[in-house]
Structure formats: structure tokens, C-alpha cells
Image: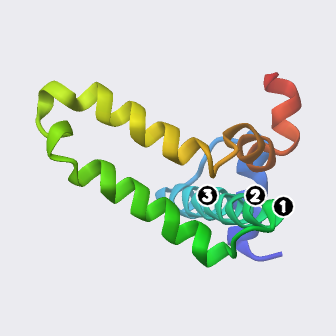
Amino acid sequence: MSRTALLLSERIAGAPCRSSRMMRVAHCLQCMTVLTWAVFSLIGSSVAWGAETPMQAVQKTIHEVFAVLGDEGLQGPAHNAERRKKLEAIIKQRFDYEEMAKRTLASTWKKLT
């Protein structure tokens, strides 16, 4: 077993972190896991409906987000809450946050819920 894999397995098991490199590796793996599940969630939701391809789903979501960001009526700090609410509604249609958390945390999920 490589040194990095050994350190990572110890970190996952709850042992104290030994190095900043280990922290970076663990953080990288965690980010990659979340991004992977985000992509699969996006693909899975579009395939389930069968109406659009994954590329079309991503393009549609990006178009909707840019439409909100470019809306002149939602510019400025006075409209931050409203703009955020609209962006969250768009993104929530594509991502299942609870499922991503379950898959990212794996066995730890049961302990935390």
C-alpha cells in the first residue's frame, strides 16, 4: 500500500492528520467525489426524463443561470437575496444535494443522520 493511501486510510479511520500534503490529497479526493456525483446526478436526472441529452441539460441550466445573472432588474446589492433565490431554484432542479451528501459521506452518513 502506498504511503498516501495509508495516510488517507488512517485519516478516514479518524486518525489525526500527519501532514499538510495529506490534507490536500484528502480535500482533493473529497472535491472530486462531490463533482463526480454532481455530474452523475445531472446526467441521471436528464436521462430519467428522456427529453434532453446531458449536454442539453447542462446548456439549459447554464443559460438559465446566465439569464438571471444578466437580468438588469436583479443587479446591485439590493437584489442579492432575490437573485440568490432564483439561482438556487434553477440549480436545485438539477442537483440532488441529499443524494450527493449520502454518496460522499458513505458509511459516515448513517452515523450523522
- Which residue matches tag 3? 26
Label 3: few (<14), some (14–19) or many (≥20) C-alpha neighbours in 10 Å: many
The reply, left or right, for residue 68 in relation to residue 16 is left
Residue depicted at 59% across the width and 74% down the height: 56
Q: Which residue is more in the foreground, 32 or 84?
A: 84
Residue 108 on image: x %, y %: 82, 36
User: With respect to residue 3, does 111 lie above or below?
Assistant: above
Q: Earlier in the sequence, mark 3 or mark 2?
A: 3
- Mark 2 near mark 1, Cβ–Cβ under 8 Å? yes
> Which amino acid type corresponds to the residue marked 1 in the rendered image?
Ala
- Any mark on residue 48, and which? 1
Spatial CA distance of label 2 from label 1 is 5 Å
The reply, left or right, for residue 45 in relation to residue 64 is right
User: With respect to residue 82, does 13 lie above or below?
Assistant: below
Q: Which residue is more in the foreground, 29 or 100?
A: 100
Extreme front residue here?
Answer: 51
Q: Which quarter of the image is occupied by the N terminus?
A: bottom right
> Which amino acid type corresponds to the residue marked 3 in the rendered image?
Ala
Residue depicted at 67% across the width and 41% down the height: 97
Residue 111, image quadrant: top right
- Which residue matches tag 2? 45
Front position among marks 3 and 2: 2
The reply, left or right, for residue 104 in relation to residue 25 is right
Q: Which residue is more in the foreground, 60 or 30?
A: 60
Residue depicted at 13% across the width and 30% down the height: 77
Q: Earlier in the sequence, mark 3 or mark 1?
A: 3
Residue 28, image quadrant: bottom right
SS for dot 2 = helix
Label 2: few (<14), some (14–19) or many (≥20) C-alpha neighbours in 10 Å: some
Residue 60 on image: x %, y %: 51, 65
